[in-house]
């Protein structure tokens, strides 16, 4: 259980998706050193000595409290001004004193819902007497909050709560008797929340957000919804909030809403958004497993595979019994019996008298088990046998499904969660009306008033940049319209060359002649688009079964090499079945880390139904994989991009992807990409590494290890990409712009301190006094701010989907009260309501203006290599995400000790020098310049040199 933090101001923001009640505080670590530029300038002249000195700079650790994020450098002025609406509702700051009380419940309870039931009973019994008519709110753990003091400093209460029986299955333990449980609740005054500091912060006169005061107000506004609905994180769900929709295999969607109080320029704001998520259908268990298996389980026997699937689907699910008329006791399923019900016997007394489950339920409850061929559910305590027949159980309503959805379920969920902007806006307003905050007794008690109108915000629509194409095309330049354009009459600005290619076909349904015809059309499209592309393959198209992928790839590679007599196969076109399981990942892993082949995979459905637009998009991907450029910003070629074109500038993108829920051993994957051309800033090289499970800080940005011959050796992804930039351009970067994806508010300080320090050390390790100025920008997409057109019928401010126009930027009213952040919708909507990206500048030694940062970010969104559309996230961050996602395929499945397959790699790392061996590699174990190694995480296999030089991840 998280420790309660003392009620003091200071913060690092809050995680939007974190559990309610957590107080996020500043991070401060004794191993993190922020390296000022002037400190590095004092290092000795020799490069190695300078690097060593930089790594071990003396000086006190810089805590987050000593660190200040850049202040907003004024508001942006560029672009056409307009008004948009945001799903933020102004909250009036209360004028009442807020007080915190410590709560201690004995015996200790781990369930927040039980804690709430206890405190609810206490308030019901004692509000008018012992609590002095106060109506408190409770965080479900250790803290109670009131508007004004309670009549006592400390007091103990005794509360009786009706308990749930867990003993009416077939069990060797005696049946428990339903009774009330007694709890002691000790309440003691802890602290007073100072709303004055919150007011000062909102007015820009105090740097740190008083997180405790914000948390109290958040809890106040959640209290009634917790009682009405099913809480999940910061969201609430209920069948009452919208019609349920089936997802298949025993799942359904529930509608709900997200709610969070946030400090903004306009004051306190309540951010409300619509949400949907998957719940388990409250069905009789037999009906549920029939849906999971998609077969009749009553008349047909279960296979071993069926049992495994059922066990996985039911483990942890709560059920209620139905075989007793007036009793609905609840249990949590721990497993399934290996035997059918008809074969199950158990001891009924201390003398080991045995009785069958069928007999027990007949004699005890008069319940005749019909489907004795099915296994029983094992429930409750796993130490003692406790059996329930499936037909006597029904799944309890309101259980969220937290495991991975399959593709059909995801598609069904997206249909529900993607309303058009007008519908989403109406749903949000309806939610505010339904919540009726004016009549909320808790909001009234604490003096909170919430507006019922969407915030009206000034916005600007930034112009699209001119794009440059090759001079041999009919159209040499292009101005995108509403975030999109096409390749008609245009040729790639730098077309790549493919002289030697082959094709391998893993799809049984595609005949050789069809595959060859498709490849010819693709080759012709590449030629039309500006590439030099040989129309004939090196060898005939090779047909293979998917289960022989490695053998087939090696045969193709060998045959091609023999035919080419030492020349390299440049491209392998791979035709895959539409449903190919792990085949895609196997192809990428084998080709990129073993054979050194660049591949382009195509699904069977596209091979049969050849579409010119599809071929054009594939040609864009092939070109950048061959080292070409599709387009560049015209301003880049004419050196007109502020703070990029004047001196050699490298732009980084970084991201960390984590394993899915339920995978408790797989490593996280960190990826860093960096531009390799200047002034074009279009080509990006990428590196990745495996690191500890759910570790957000990128461990291998800079590291050191000891070599027996060379002594101290420096490495890491930043260092390697800086060296790569110099090799590609002939110049060292004199400015660094670093876009960091995937960081939540509560991690800002921690990530900045750690990763900026690594950048500093990587630079210092290359050359004495080398410290180019750094701008560090966090990119966020997992937020809940939505922007709507002020008038949905106004065609000049919306696109075809009804969304706001690409280039719409907001940096006032709903942004941070003082810091340098903005919302940018850089893409045109396709489905549902567009989500703007949120950019927050955490460090800026380049002194960007608001217009400079916003225009650069927006313009870069038009340089994404894989399509002729502007994208929703700045491309370097997008590429880092793609590279990290690709690297997960490089981890071959391991057999865990329990015999189950695991995606993770669990063996210890090698010498820690992985980054020097290849582009995509796992590193760790051998020491790390930032003081945090990756011991215990096996390195990823290294990319082949010819692969890592190009944008293979596209």
Image (tube, rainbow, N blue to C red):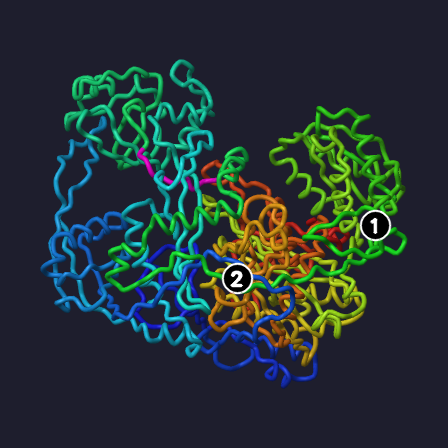
Describe the element under mark 1 as helix, strand or loop.
Answer: loop
Up the image or down, 260 lies above or below 5; here it is above
Q: Left or right of 112: which side holds 91? A: right
Q: Main secondary structure of the magenta part?
A: loop
Labels 1, 2: front one: 1
- From this view, report whether residue 833 is shown above or below residue 655: above
Helix, strand or loop status at disc 2: loop
Q: Quadrant of the N terminus?
A: bottom left
Q: Residue at x 28, y 59 (%)?
A: 443
Q: Residue at x 70, y 49 (%)?
A: 954
Which residue sits furthest bottom? 42
Give the side of residue 608 with respect to residue 893, left or right.
Answer: right
Residues shaded magenta? 396-404
From the top left corner, tell me how far across and down residue 285 is, in percent: 34, 26
Residue marked by disc 2: 697
Of marks 1 and 2, which one's residue comes earlier in the chain?
A: 1
Residue 135 at least partly seen: yes
Circle 1 is placed at which residue position?
A: 490
| Residue pictured at 10% horizontal, 61% vertical | 130
């Amino acid at each position: 259980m998280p420790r309660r933090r003392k009620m003091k101001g200071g913060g690092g923001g809050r995680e939007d998706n974190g559990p309610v009640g957590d107080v996020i505080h500043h991070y401060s670590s004794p191993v993190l050193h922020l390296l000022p530029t002037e400190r590095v300038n004092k290092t000795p002249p020799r490069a190695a000595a300078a690097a060593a000195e930089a790594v071990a700079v003396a000086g006190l650790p810089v805590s987050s409290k000593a660190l200040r994020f850049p202040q907003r450098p004024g508001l942006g002025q560029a672009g056409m001004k307009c008004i948009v609406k945001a799903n933020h509702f102004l909250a009036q700051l209360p004028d009442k004193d807020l007080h915190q009380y410590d709560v201690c419940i004995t015996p200790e309870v781990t369930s927040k819902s039980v804690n709430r039931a206890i405190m609810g009973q206490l308030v019901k019994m004692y509000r008018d007497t012992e609590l002095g008519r106060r109506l408190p709110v409770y965080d479900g753990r250790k803290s109670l909050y009131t508007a004004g003091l309670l009549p006592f400093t400390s007091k103990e209460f005794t509360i009786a709560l009706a308990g749930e029986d867990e003993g009416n299955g077939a069990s060797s333990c005696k049946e428990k008797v339903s009774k009330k449980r007694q709890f002691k609740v000790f309440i003691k005054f802890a602290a007073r929340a100072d709303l004055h500091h919150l007011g000062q912060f909102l007015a820009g006169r105090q740097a740190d957000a008083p997180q405790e005061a914000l948390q109290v107000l958040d809890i106040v506004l959640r209290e009634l919804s917790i009682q009405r609905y099913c809480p999940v994180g910061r969201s609430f769900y209920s069948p009452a909030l919208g019609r349920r929709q089936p997802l298949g295999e025993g799942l359904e969607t529930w509608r709900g809403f997200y709610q969070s109080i946030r400090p903004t320029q306009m004051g306190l704001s309540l951010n409300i958004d619509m949400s949907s998520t998957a719940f388990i259908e409250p069905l009789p268990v037999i009906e549920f497993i029939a849906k999971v298996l998609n077969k009749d389980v009553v008349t047909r026997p279960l296979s071993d595979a069926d049992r495994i699937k059922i066990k996985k689907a039911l483990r942890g699910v709560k059920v209620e019994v139905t075989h007793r008329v007036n009793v609905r006791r609840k249990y949590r399923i721990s497993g399934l019996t290996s035997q059918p019900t008809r074969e199950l016997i158990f001891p009924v007394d201390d003398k080991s008298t045995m009785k069958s489950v069928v007999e027990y339920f007949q004699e005890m409850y008069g319940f005749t088990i019909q489907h004795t061929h099915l296994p029983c559910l094992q429930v409750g305590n796993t130490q003692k046998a406790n059996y329930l027949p499936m037909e006597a159980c029904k799944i309890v309503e309101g259980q969220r499904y937290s495991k991975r959805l399959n593709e059909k379920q995801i598609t069904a969920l997206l249909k529900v969660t993607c309303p058009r902007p007008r519908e989403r806006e109406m749903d949000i307003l309806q939610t505010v009306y339904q919540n009726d905050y004016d009549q909320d007794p808790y909001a009234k008690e604490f003096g909170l008033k919430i507006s019922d109108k969407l915030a009206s915000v000034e916005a600007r629509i930034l112009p699209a940049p001119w794009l440059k194409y090759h001079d041999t095309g009919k159209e040499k330049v292009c101005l995108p319209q509403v975030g999109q354009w096409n390749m008609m009459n245009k040729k790639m600005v730098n077309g790549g060359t493919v002289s030697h290619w082959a094709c391998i076909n893993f799809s049984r349904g595609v005949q050789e002649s069809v595959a060859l015809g498709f490849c010819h059309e693709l080759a012709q499209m590449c030629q039309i688009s500006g590439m030099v592309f040989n129309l004939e393959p090196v060898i005939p198209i090779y047909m293979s079964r998917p289960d022989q992928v490695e053998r087939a790839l090696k045969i193709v590679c060998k045959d091609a090499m023999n035919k080419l007599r030492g020349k390299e196969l440049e491209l392998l076109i791979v035709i895959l079945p539409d449903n190919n399981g792990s085949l895609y990942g196997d192809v990428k892993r084998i080709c990129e880390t073993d054979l050194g082949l660049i591949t382009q995979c195509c699904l069977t459905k596209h091979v049969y139904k050849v579409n010119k637009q599809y071929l054009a998009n594939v040609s864009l991907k092939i070109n950048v994989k061959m080292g070409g450029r599709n387009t560049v910003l015209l301003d880049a070629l004419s050196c007109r991009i502020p703070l990029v074109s004047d001196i050699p500038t490298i732009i980084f993108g970084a991201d960390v992807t984590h394993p899915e829920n339920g995978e408790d051993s797989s490593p996280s994957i960190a990826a860093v990409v960096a531009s390799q051309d200047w002034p074009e800033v279009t080509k990006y090289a990428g590196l990745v590494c495996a690191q500890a499970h759910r570790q957000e800080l990128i461990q291998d940005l800079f590291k050191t290890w000891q070599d027996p011959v060379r002594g101290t050796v420096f490495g890491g992804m930043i260092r390697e990409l800086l060296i790569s930039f110099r090799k590609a351009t002939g110049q060292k970067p004199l400015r660094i712009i670093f876009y960091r994806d995937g960081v939540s508010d509560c991690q800002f300080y921690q990530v900045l301190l750690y990763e900026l320090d690594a950048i500093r050390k990587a630079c210092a390790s290359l050359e004495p006094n080398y410290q180019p100025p750094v701008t560090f920008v966090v990119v966020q997409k997992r937020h809940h701010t939505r922007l709507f057109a002020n008038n949905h019928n106004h065609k000049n401010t919306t696109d075809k989907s009804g969304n706001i126009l690409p280039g719409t930027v907001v940096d006032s009213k709903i942004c941070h009260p003082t810091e340098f952040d903005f919302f940018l919708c850089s893409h045109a909507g396709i489905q549902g309501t567009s989500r703007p990206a949120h950019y927050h500048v955490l460090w800026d030694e380049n002194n960007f203006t608001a217009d400079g940062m916003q225009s650069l970010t927006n313009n870069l969104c038009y340089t994404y290599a894989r399509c002729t559309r502007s994208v929703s996230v700045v491309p370097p961050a997008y590429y880092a995400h793609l590279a990290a996602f690709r690297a997960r395929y490089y981890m071959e499945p391991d057999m865990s000790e329990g015999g189950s397959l695991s995606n993770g790699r669990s063996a210890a790392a090698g010498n820690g020098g992985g980054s020097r061996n290849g582009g995509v590699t796992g590193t760790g174990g051998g020491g790390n310049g930032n003081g945090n190694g990756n011991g215990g995480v096996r390195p990823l296999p290294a990319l082949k040199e010819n692969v890592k030089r190009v944008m293979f991840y596209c």
